[in-house]
Amino acid sequence: MIELLGINKTYRRPTGESVEALIDVSLQINRGEFVAIIGSSGSGKSTLMNILGLLDLPSQGSYRIDEQNVAGLGANEQASLRNKRIGFVFQTFHLLPRTSALENVELPLLYSDRTSTKGLGRKALDSVGLADRISHQPSELSGGQQQRVAIARALVNEPDILLADEPTGNLDQRAAFEVMAIFQKLNNAGRTIVLVTHDADIANHCRRIVRIESGRIVSDTWVVEPKDALQEAV
């Protein structure tokens, strides 16, 4: 489903010095996988996530989704593809403060070309266990609940791919396990999920762990028995 081949990303500092954020990265992710990309700060994991999400372009290399060279698309075509096929969850929730959970979740539908969007916001909130919180504003929700609203917002357009960048970074342990339990449930239902983290314990809830250091993939392993987040959250 996702194929990166020979990806390089070079940034140039104001001084003119070049910085290689990604070096010869090749990665294949099949439909329905749950992959953790793990690395320390500055390892290149967030740059890799930005390229996967079409928020940034590689300096060199090929990026394909279902055999389509998406890195070569124009800006409008990339924006359309993101809206239709990719959902994003970030460490910070990015919820509008004086807006209900339902209204926050429905925001991406404003840019959708679907003929009907009725009920999609409620369905997404129900999928993360917040059907009883649709009228609550972010200030009336816990951190874990706010992140679940953010996950529902990422799901509202029913994307093929869910990208999560440090989604448990601002949560306490129990809320983090609750969020990981939602990701595991979504993956068990067939959703493709790529999750960036620096936390090995969080990564062990995924089915596959890709480790990146200094811009290079240094290991790619399968987790025989991923931790059950639902049991840990109890």
Image (spheres, rainbow, N blue to C red):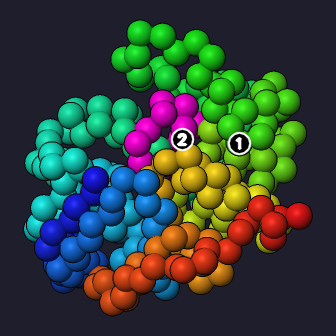
Q: Position of residue 77 (x, y in %)?
A: 21, 34
Q: For the magenta stretch, what is the residue range?
A: 153-162
**Which disc number belongs to residue 128?**
1
Q: Position of residue 60 (x, y in %)?
A: 11, 68
User: Could you tell whether 103 is left or right of 13 in the image?
Assistant: right
Q: Position of residue 75 (x, y in %)?
A: 20, 39
**Which disc number belongs to residue 51?**
none
> Which is more N-terminal, label 1 or label 2?
1
Quadrant, the C terminus = bottom right
Q: Is residue 197 located in the magenta-colored stretch of the structure?
A: no
Q: Position of residue 63 (x, y in %)?
A: 18, 58
Of circles 2 and 1, the one toward us is 1
Q: Tag 2: residue type?
A: Ala
Q: Tag 1: residue type?
A: Val
**Which disc number belongs to residue 154?**
2
Viewer-side residue, 43 vs 160: 160
Residue 199 seen in render: no
Residue under the image location 15 percent in, 49 percent down: 67
Q: Give SS at disc 2.
A: helix
Residue under the image location 37 percent in, 39 percent down: 85
